[in-house]
Image (cartoon, rainbow, N blue to C red):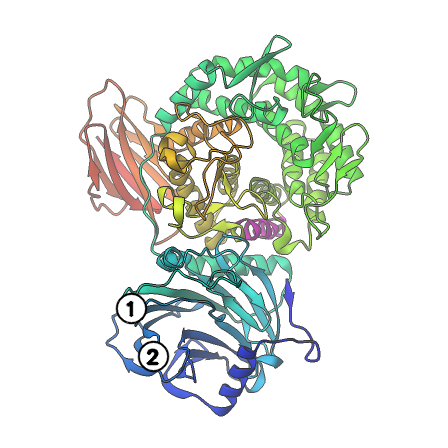
Amino acid sequence: MVRRQSDTELAVSGAVLALREELAAGMRLIALFDIGIRRVTIALGSDAVWAIIRRPDLGGLAVRLAHCPGGGAKIRKRRKRSDEQLRIEVSSAIGLHEIVLRIDTLGLGLLRATVTLTPNAPLLVPFHPRDVYPLGLNDDPLTAHGQVEAAQRGLNSGITFFHIDEPAFGSVLYFQNLTALNTYFTATKTKPDAAVGGEWPELGYLPPTPPQSGTPPTDPIPADATVTMSDAILVFHDDTACDEQDMARRFLQMLGTAYRQLEPPPTDYRDWVWRAEKTLDDLQNAPEATIRHYGHTYIHPYTDAEYPDVMVQMSLIAALRDYAAWTRQPVALEDELKGGLVKFHDTNLKTMRRYLPNVGKDKDKLAVDSWYLYHPLLNLGRLAIDGDARAKRFFLDSLDYAIEAAHHFKYAWPIQFKVDSFDVIVEARNDDGLGQTDVGGIYAYVMLQAYELTDDPSFLDEARAAIDAARGMRFELNYQANLTAWGASACLRLWRITNREYYMRQSYVYLASFFHNCEIWESEIANARHYRNFLGATCLHDAPYMAIYECFDSFSAFEGYLKDSGPDLDPAARLLISEYCKYALDRAWFYYPDALPAEVLATEIRNGHIDRTLSFPLEDLYADGQPAGQVGQEIYGAGAAFVFASRSFHAVEGAPFRIFCDHFPVTSERTSERSLSFGIDGGTARSSSFSIVRLPGKRFARVTLRTAGGETIRPRHRSADRIDFVIPASGQVMLAW
């Protein structure tokens, strides 16, 4: 968080002082319009075109639209299109800027400013100033008091979220659509790492430029090439400071508003059923996948590498259990792996240990990451609730130790500790002193599983205590993406059980932290053009990459969250979760090395090796196009295929096909022998992919798909094996064959 300092402490750049002087002297007026109660003035300064957004007597915001070094800019208004508020051209020494402004006043106030530049000559960019300045009384940026709550982390979304408290202008979400800027990044060989943020009162987007050094930049924007320099979306809320729950909900609402402005990237049909079958065959037959200890079979964490650990085994066991239930056929490997769990169980400590007793001397067999203690229990709990007696025994026997650890650390877990003594090995993730901040969420989920199995109210008390202990974390709550997602799900389940709205509101704190750590843009930088990253969550709060395990485990957590939700759930939260899951089904395909060109794969690999013939995903993909799979080929992420297949493909009894949908169904009813209704709830004005997939050896039936209102939906694609449709992401469709 960045706080506005007192006037005597506030250090500012020359750009801030120059803006103050220009505002005091006056600028040349170009246009005026309103966004609700806010008056927007478009004006020409000495070297820039500005949007000055004021709230009467309550301060304002100055947004630099076009930077024109050298001055002397000439303005010409152009004919605007039907969805535009204003379109102008700005001629200056460096070239021609075109500025397009769009507004929305139906919900939260919104201004979208898209700015392109066509240089007069090959243009080097050694520096470009930030674009957003809070304004106090008399348009003075030095007298505006407020706080930045969140800013871009690494290559995640280009976001800054702040409020201006004195004067009480309100809250602002600034979203830079980085997808539109790919041509700039490619031309200048830069990447937008932490490009959106700043120090009060100089905020917003700092276009990336080559590092300042003795060697000047040599990669120009080509002459006469039109490059998007900025595509900024600003969303306004009247309220200012508030508690963290209100702030989190406000952030989600404002992010949802900005998200709806984006042109949705395409998705493709992914055959997760084929992928699951191939993965299962490789797990069973590839010698690199498994190892034998104590007469049992165990999964390697990476291709022919690393020691078996309990989290890896339970991740695959739970995914195989889901897949077996979906296929209605037992999977022999599931039982094989469950047989080996006994060697992880410590009968003295009464807990599941991370490693087998014979782990190599290069590992500390007493060491455990905090989340490694609880995540295997979560999967054991899922099996126990499904009726697995052995899983229930291990689960219940481990609860006392799990609670003892929570009490010892006062619900604030370190990174790593000793299981026999609770001695801390690694206290904090960095110099902020914070440990694994979201472990309390997954701990709460485990306690709720225990409550479901036993009806013992002490477990419910434990879940509440863990969630309550996370108060005040705000946007620092996220440590690891999937843990944050499970925490959100635990909060919503607590709301369902206790009927206390506090827990639904607290789920928004987890969600806000999760989506703050997402890449809501599509990168075309270097190797990233070969895969998709849109709406992917970086695996850790400071990680440089997206990881497959966190991807599909968050998907599973959000399935539970949506099942526990209802009409009280904020529509923005429902929209963002549904869109995350939709795009997970698409982009996760590219973690598999056979889906990528061989030349984009890493050659220096931290764990094991990469085998493109094996259907095991890579751990890591990078928005900045670094070589994929540097961490390794992640066998413990192989459960992704089973989870995605069992959640997105739906059997239709007696029909020669199955249904694929990239949204979770909320209703499905067989209305006759040859018809059914299928309902989803993913957000208004969004779309969903819906496919009819022919079963092997069956003849395709003639199908008709209609909306609930009776409108026939035409296919967008048809082949011998599949018919693809695009349907509304909210509502029902009627299928007949």
Residue 92 badge: 2
Question: 213 or 226, which lies in front?
Answer: 213
Residue 171 badge: none
Question: Tag 2 or tag 1, which sits nearer the N-term?
Answer: 1
- Outermost residue to the top: 295
Question: 736 or 319, which lies in front?
Answer: 319
Q: Residue at x 50, y 67 (%)?
A: 204
- For the residue marked with disc 2, what is the amino acid? Ser
Question: 9 or 111, which lies in front?
Answer: 9
Badge 1 marks a residue whose secondary structure is loop
Q: Is residue 360 visible?
A: yes
- For the residue marked with disc 1, what is the amino acid? Asp
x, y (%) of residue 52? 46, 80
- Quadrant of residue 349 within the rendered picture: top right
x, y (%) of residue 81? 25, 71
x, y (%) of residue 422? 79, 34
Q: Magenta stretch?
A: 500-514
Q: Where does the C terminus fall, quadrant-wise?
A: top left
Q: Residue at x 63, y 17 (%)?
A: 341
Q: Residue at x 72, y 39 (%)?
A: 462
Q: Is residue 502 magenta?
A: yes
Is 705 positioned to the left or the right of 155 in the image?
left
Residue 83 badge: 1
Q: Where does the N terminus fall, quadrant-wise?
A: bottom right
Q: Is residue 682 visible?
A: no
Mark 1 neighbour class, 10 Å CA radius: few under 14, some 14 to 19, many 20 or more = few
